[in-house]
Image (cartoon, rainbow, N blue to C red):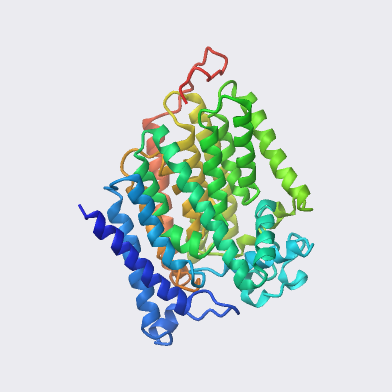
Amino acid sequence: MPRPFLVRYAGLAGSLFLAVAAWSGGASSPWEPNVTPGTIFAGENGVLLPVSWLLGTLLLIGAWWAGRRHVPSLRWAYVTAALWAVPLLPFLPLASYDAYSYACQGWQQSAGLDPYSGGLDLLGCPWADAVSPTWRQTPAPYGPVFLVLAALAAKIGGGLTGTVAVLRLIAVLGVVVIGICLPVLARRAGVPPQRAVWLVLACPLVPIHLISGAHNDAVMVALLVAGLTVATGATTWPRMITAGVLLGLAVGVKATAVVVLPFAVLLLPGRWWRSALVLGSAAAAALGAVSLGAGLGLGWVTSLSGSGVSVQWTSMPTAVGLTLELFGVPTAVPVARVAGMIILAVVLVLLWVRVVSRPDSHDPVHYAGLALAATVILAPVFHPWYAVWPLAVLAATVRRETLWLVTPCAVAAALCLPDGYNLALVTKAQGAVVMTVLAGCLVWKVLNEANRHPLRPRVDHGGGDRSHRAP
């Protein structure tokens, strides 16, 4: 059993090494992809940058992994996670140029333009040269809630550096909210709160991507977790409406948050359709109010297709398609992606039906986490920070072994080089085949579990009223 002292300061050393990597090779302006496996092996980046990134990543992942079995206290987990995050705050964004895209979209919104009507090439932005060319022609794929926050950051920050600093502050506040809500959800599920906090806040994905990279996923996850926390045991109208508002705002950051709403409905007392009406109305009202207040419509929904330009094996359906193309099947990637979305819809319905059919033995919050996991696994595109979505919920509900939960996050945390180059690009064929094999194993396991535990609807003589259940 590693000593808490060693775990804390090994991770801090890793964070300091990553701070050096961010200072010497983070995502800089103007856009210049200066770190790739090729440049590293050719010696173009020197020794300090690749060594600091490698040591920092290994130490941070190793300390998080080693510490998960014995977390001394909730306070210790909070302090350690904060220590690991602080060194990354003053330096360039790590592992992604997305913060610069956010800044430009915020500038467009604050200037009275419609970020959903076109990309930077059409609408312009004074910091356009900092954005990756891949995204310069793409309209904003984010909801109006985040565009309002990004516009606020642009107004307060003034220049690019100030705007990114405010975006990072917003991400930090999101992580703080997650840390406040996690113990409530964990205690409700009978999970040690210090372990839940450790698994999420100390996960390398949080300091590297949510805080240093200032990704808006921090805001979405914070609103999701807060909405689930408020919905837990909600028996009064104001609390039910508040839960709906928070979840609606989460959808207003990223549309994928919508998969949580059907499970949040089951946390409320009374007939599920009545709860759905209350929660859904509050969520829609909040989302509509922000959209109207910002002068935006629903263009962000149609803009979601722009994110599919990324074709990497880290997405399971995309990996299956790439593998089929390796064996001579033409245009298999788009077909596999469509199939993945159809399978996702079926999985989400089955998860919801399973909770409804056995309300006394299945926790809606846990199944909300499984729904997020299914969304991440079956989506056409996967970026490392997406793994935080299910992690933030499942860490508070998984009572037994967490190896299956932390392993994907550990792998994801090591995928991106300091300025955002994804190592999946240099392992396209090999990664696709491995991911396809994993997909086959996952399908076998799911079918095996389904045979062992067939879905048998529970007869409810009470007309669907769940108010007798303990929250």
Q: Could you tell whether 415 is left or right of 113 in the image?
A: left
Q: Position of residue 415 (x, y in %)?
A: 43, 66
Choose between 319 and 41: the one closer to the eye: 41
Choose between 134 and 105: the one closer to the eye: 105
Instruction: List the single residue furthest toward the top.
Output: 461
Number of callouts in the render? Answer: 0
- The vertical placement of 204 against 176, above or below, is below
Q: Could you tell whether 143 is left or right of 56 in the image?
A: right
Choose between 169 and 145: the one closer to the eye: 169
| Residue at x 31%, y 39% (from the top left corner) | 400
- The vertical placement of 373 against 459, above or below, is below
Q: Could you tell whether 307 is left or right of 202 in the image?
A: right
Q: Position of residue 12 (x, y in %)?
A: 34, 64
Q: Position of residue 163 (x, y in %)?
A: 62, 67
Quarter holding residue 120: bottom right
| Residue at x 61%, y 30% (from the top left corner) | 240
Quarter holding residue 2: bottom left
Tell me if residue 203 can be seen. Answer: no
Q: Position of residue 289 (x, y in %)?
A: 74, 44
| Residue at x 53%, y 20% (from the top left corner) | 466
| Residue at x 64%, y 68% (from the top left corner) | 135
- The vertical placement of 208 against 373, above or below, is below
Tell me if residue 118 can be seen. Answer: yes
